[in-house]
Amino acid sequence: MKFGLDDLESETLSGPTNANMKMKNVTPKTHNLCMCITRIRSTILVLSLALAGILAWQASAEQARYDSQPGGGKVKIEGTSSIHEWSMESPVIGGFIEADAGFPESALKGGAAKPKVEIKIPVRTLKSYNKRMDEVYQEHMEEPKFKFMEYKLTELKPKGDAPKGGKCEFDAVGTMTIHGVSKPLTMPVTIEKAEVEKDGKKSPQLKITGTTPLKMNDYGVKPPCPNIPGVGQITTGDEIKVTFEWSPRQK
Amino acid sequence: MNEPKAETAEFNRRDFLKGGSVATLMAMMGGVQLLAQPAPDKSGETKSPGPKVKVAVIGLGSWGRDILDQLGRLPQVEIAAICDNYPAMVRRSAGKAPGAAQVEDYKAVLDNKDVQAVIIATPTHLHKDIASAALQAGKHVYCEAPLAHTIEDAKAIALAAKNAVGQVFQAGLQMRSDPQRHFLLPFIRSGALGKFVMARAQWHKKQSWRSASPNPEREKAVNWRLSRSTSSGLIGEIGIHQLDQAAWFLNARPVSVGGYGAILRGDNDGRDVPDTVQLIVEHAGGVRLIYDATLANSFDSDYEIYYGTDAAVMLRDNKAWMFKEVDSPLLGWEVYARKDAFYKETGIALVAGGSKQTALDDKAAQEAAPFPPLYYALQSFIGNCPETTAAVEDFSATYDPKDKAGLAQHLATIKFRPAASYHDGYAATVLAIKANEAVVKGESIALKPEWYELA
């Protein structure tokens, strides 16, 4: 790059003066050389500052990964029928969260990096402990064909700009896939972070809780109407309520 | 006036001849019956059996053949292979398992990827090698009780089962799966008997236990029950079930066992295993079980009685009766229950989920559990195998497949069908082995807690 003397005239940057450059002989040639070096130095300085800035930004937006742990999740589904209410539970929630080190608080402020959340639950793990009911459920979910229920987060919309009692509240906007059918789903969730100790090692763990209503028909699942010996045919309500608690942990 | 009398007498005789069973005899003589509803458990029954569980049976003696009979009643079973190292036994069992591969070497069965589960019904001293290899091969295992002939071998099997987290291991204590026992357990433990006083059990059946054989080598193999080197005798082969049941119902660990044994049948065939044994097992808390078994006399067959300060409960023939003390508190329901007179006592029939209606219904009383305990034990095993496999698959798809502790924790959340675990089998085997030792030596042995430890 060539800098003209004109540029230097308007230079406000306190560059080298003849004095501090300890130039013995100031000639146009040496002056140009000085300025070039100065310019290069400034450029390097600016670039390194910029780079440092980028790195610093990366560090604060450093991706932390929280993975599902066995026993660290539970899902409950409640529904209705013509004879009585029913519920099913699963102790298995699989998946992960990738978010920055300041998550979840950082997500309350706009402009933070979006967390990546993927959840999957094996259909078979949802049980009512009435074997016949579990069978009917698996038949209607076409279990061997669709083995998992999945959720992918699109966006976390903050509710409030500060945590309440350590808990951050959001509206989670994402896609739910059940029975092979994907539908957009928005549900309120609460996220908090704690440090837990396992095997003598401390690591951050998130706790996410939430609840949402769902309709079976939305996902192509026909509400079962099985024939119960001694009672007759019963019908199940289309609407169900899903409640979950999930605690993925950093390794 | 005379006619009605004669008629009553006729009726009783006819009934007696028609019944011909202990139950009919008891019902006529009296005794209040405790019984679980004969109707099959509807919540447990599946509409479609689903994919079949491929099972192999190793060991085709009389018990192995009984197992084949019961397996034939389970729709979700496919008997993939039958195996015995004596070809004649294989041929004899072939009719009970049409389509099954007929094999002589158990290793071939374990190498067969199709076989998901194996049932081991060989002579006791041969269990260890087969069970260990089967667990190693990734199979679900049902191993007959007692697990082994020595505590060392039993421990090896139990530890192998403990490590095989994703595989089913069921010990052959079939009473632990019996719906009648499961019905009685909470009743007995609820304190309906008051405080436990003692227990009594017996097993009497006049039989030789000696089997005929074409040559001396086979003779030794087939009569393994009659030699101390390979058999824990009546206690190991028969008593173990009743001893285990007592500890289970009393909810108390056995602390010492003392006994006597003698060879009194007069076979003079070189057997050194006592054919008549008497045993006293002391449980933690001071409640003792008095047990006797003999191959020399059949009178009164087999039963178990639990005595308490308020009542006694007798289990006989898969039915049960309760005999209340005069001064025991009224439970209420017994006002409607069927009562049968036993000699001078009155026994009250307990019907699970019973109403006044069922209590008065004689027919319901006659049919207790329609199937023998072995059927329920196998049903539990066959039900638990695919459930376990599915749970392991789901766990591995979600978490780290190598996380054994996590897998064990996950399996603990699942409600499996009732079955004797490796731990139940091991504890019962230790008790049986030591009890037999006591009988053979004619002394009392304290049961050390470290024998029960599975590191």
Image: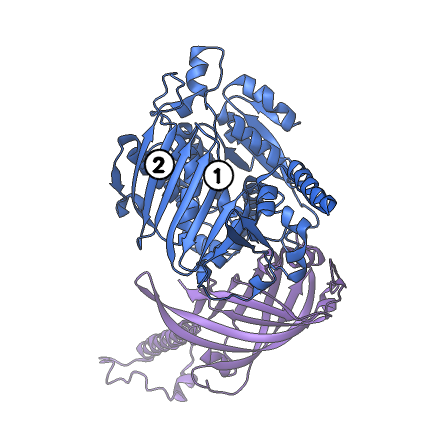
User: In the figure, residue B379 lies in which quadrant?
Assistant: top right
Does residue B9 appear to the left or right of B110 in the view shown? right
Mark 1 is on which residue type? Asp
Q: Chain of mark 2?
A: B
User: In the figure, residue B101 lies in which quadrant?
Assistant: top right
Which residue occupies the foreground of this view, B103 or B311?
B311
Q: Which of the image's four quarters has the C terminus of chain A?
A: bottom left
Which type of secondary structure does the marked residue at label 1 adopt?
strand
How many circles with numbers are drawn on the protein? 2
Residue B183, image x and y in percent? 54, 54
Above or below for A156 versus B276: below
Does residue B303 appear to the left or right of B76 in the view shown? left
Name the residue that disc number 2 marks: B278
Residue B75, image x and y in percent? 66, 40
Dot 1 or dot 2, earlier in sequence? 2
- How packed mark 2 is, by other alpha carbons closer than 10 Å (few <14, some 14-19, many 20 or more), is some
**Separation of marks 1 and 2 at Cα, in angstroms:** 14 Å
Residue B390, image x and y in percent? 57, 49
Mark 2 is on which residue type? Gln
User: In the figure, residue A241 lies in which quadrant?
Assistant: bottom right
